[in-house]
C-alpha cells in the first residue's frame, strides 16, 4: 500500500476545505472540453497519407491530462478557459507527435490497443506525419494574445527540447551497464515532468498570473510529475495485479532501469549484485521466478522504503511551491486534491 501519511490530513480530506464549484471547473469537465475540441480539429485532406495519421492517432483517446492541466491553470487564475483551448490542443498534438515517433523507435505494434501509425501505414509516413504534427502544434500554440506569444513559445520550446532530451537519455540508458540515481531522476524529469510543468505555466500566464506565480505552478507540476513517475516504478513491483492495469513486474522482466533497480545495485552486497546481474544477463527465463527473485532482493535492501522516501521529497517540494502561490485557499485546495488523486492510487 502506498504511504499517505506524508500528505497532511487537511489536504486529504476533501470536505475540510470545499472547492468552490461555482467558479472552478472540475478536471473531468476540462478533459471533456479537450476531447470535444480534438474532434473538431481539421487537417488538410491532401496528401492523405501525410494528414490521415494525425487524425488517426488523436482519435485513439487517452486521458487528455496534459491539456486539461493547461485549462485548469488558466481557470485557477480566473482566466477565460475558451481562450486557452487552442494552446491546450497544441500540448495534446505535441504529446501525440512524441508518441508517434516513440512508437517507431520502440518498434511498437500497438498504441492504446490499436495498430500504431508506422504499422498501419509505414515508417516513412509516420516520421513525416510526426514532423507535420509538430508544426500543427506550433500553429495552435501561436493562437494566443500577441503580448503572450513570445513568453509562451519560449516555454513551449523549452518543454519540447526537454522531452526530446529525456527520450534520448532513456534510449542511451538501455545500452549502459550502470546509471546513477541523479541521472535517472533527470531523465524522468525531462521525459515526463517538464510537460506537466510547462502546461501549467502556459495556462497560468493565459489566465493572468504573474511570472512568479506561473513559475511556482510550473515547479508544482514538475515535482508532482517526478513523484508520480517514482510511484509508477513502485507500483510496477508492488502494485495489486487486479488494479495496476498492466503486468506487475514488467520492469523487472524487461530489465528496465528504474529507481528501484538502480538503488538496489547501489546498495547490494557482492552476492546480491551478482544475482541481479545474473538475472539481467539471462535471455531465457521463467518470468514469475525472475520477478520473485529480484523482488526478494529489493525487500532485503528495503528498496521500497527508499523509493517512497524520495517520492515524498518531491511531493513535499510540490506542496511547498503551491503554498507560495498567490491564489485563494479554495483554489489551492483544488490543486491539493488533484495531487492527492494522482499520488494516492493503485493503478
Image: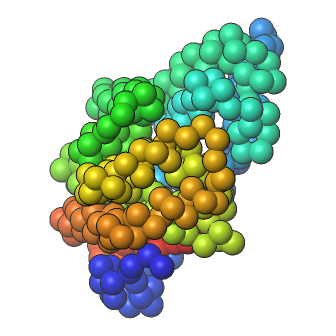
Please name the residue shown 57% across and 16% down the image: 131
**Above or below 139: residue 331:** below
Marker count (numbered)? 0
Q: Residue at x 69, y 15 (%)?
A: 123
Give x and y (percent) for residue 44: 74, 17
Residue closer to the observer: 283 or 90: 283
| The one of 290 and 202 positioned closer to us in this rendering | 290
Rendered position, 133 above or below 166: above
Where residue 318 sits: x, y (%)? Answer: 27, 62
Instruction: Determine whether 133 is above or below 190 in the image.
Output: above
Q: Residue 284, relative to residue 140: is it above or below?
A: below
- Taking depth in this image into account, of 227 and 296 the one nearest to the observer is 296
Task: Point out the residue furthest to the front here.
Answer: 271
Which residue is painted at 77% across and 45% down in the image?
113
The residue located at (41%, 44%) in the rendering is 277
Residue 163's quadrant in the figure? top left
Colouring of the image? rainbow
**Residue 52 image point, x, y percent:** 78, 22
User: For this view, does 230 lie left or right of residue 220?
Assistant: right
Residue 33 is left or right of residue 114, and the answer is left
- Mark yes or no: residue 193 visible: no
The picture places residue 224, in percent across and down from the top left corner, at: 36, 59
Residue 26 placement: quadrant: bottom right
In this rendering, position of residue 105 left or right of residue 302 = right
The reply to whether residue 98 is in sight is yes
Position of the C terminus by quadrant: bottom right
44 left or right of 254?
right
Amino acid at each position: 500500500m502506498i504511504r499517505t501519511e506524508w500528505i497532511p490530513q487537511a489536504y486529504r480530506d476533501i470536505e475540510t476545505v470545499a472547492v468552490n464549484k461555482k467558479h472552478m471547473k472540475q478536471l473531468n469537465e476540462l478533459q471533456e472540453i479537450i476531447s470535444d475540441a480534438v474532434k473538431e480539429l481539421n487537417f488538410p485532406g491532401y496528401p492523405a497519407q501525410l494528414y490521415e495519421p494525425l487524425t488517426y492517432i488523436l482519435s485513439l483517446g487517452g486521458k487528455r491530462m496534459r491539456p486539461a492541466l493547461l485549462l485548469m491553470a488558466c481557470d485557477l487564475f480566473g482566466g477565460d478557459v475558451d481562450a486557452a483551448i487552442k494552446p491546450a490542443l497544441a500540448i495534446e498534438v505535441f504529446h501525440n507527435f512524441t508518441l508517434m515517433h516513440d512508437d517507431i523507435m520502440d518498434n511498437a505494434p500497438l498504441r492504446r490497443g490499436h495498430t500504431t501509425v508506422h504499422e498501419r501505414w509505414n515508417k516513412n509516413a509516420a516520421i513525416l506525419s510526426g514532423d507535420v504534427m509538430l508544426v500543427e502544434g506550433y500553429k495552435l500554440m501561436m493562437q494566443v494574445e500577441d503580448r503572450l506569444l513570445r513568453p509562451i513559445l519560449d516555454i513551449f520550446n523549452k518543454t519540447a527540447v526537454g522531452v526530446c532530451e529525456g527520450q534520448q537519455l532513456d534510449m542511451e540508458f538501455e545500452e549502459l551497464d550502470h546509471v546513477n540515481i541523479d541521472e535517472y531522476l533527470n531523465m524522468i524529469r525531462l521525459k515526463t515532468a517538464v510537460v506537466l510543468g510547462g502546461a501549467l505555466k502556459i495556462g497560468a500566464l493565459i489566465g493572468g498570473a504573474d511570472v512568479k506565480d506561473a513559475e511556482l505552478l510550473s515547479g508544482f507540476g514538475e515535482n508532482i510529475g517526478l513523484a508520480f513517475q517514482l510511484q509508477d516504478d513502485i507500483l510496477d513491483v508492488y502494485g495489486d495485479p487486479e488494479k495496476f492495469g498492466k503486468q506487475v513486474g514488467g520492469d523487472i522482466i524487461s530489465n528496465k532501469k528504474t529507481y528501484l533497480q538502480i538503488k538496489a545495485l547501489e546498495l547490494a552486497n557482492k552476492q546480491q549484485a551478482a544475482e541481479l546481474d545474473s538475472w539481467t544477463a539471462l535471455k531465457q527465463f521463467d518470468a514469475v521466478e525472475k520477478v520473485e527473485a529480484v523482488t526478494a532482493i529489493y525487500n532485503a535492501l528495503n528498496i521500497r522504503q527508499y523509493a517512497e522516501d524520495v517520492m515524498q521529497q518531491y511531493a513535499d517540494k510540490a506542496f511547498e511551491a503551491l503554498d507560495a502561490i498567490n491564489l485563494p485557499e479554495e483554489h489551492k485546495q483544488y490543486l491539493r486534491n488533484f495531487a492527492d488523486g494522482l499520488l494516492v492510487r493503485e493503478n
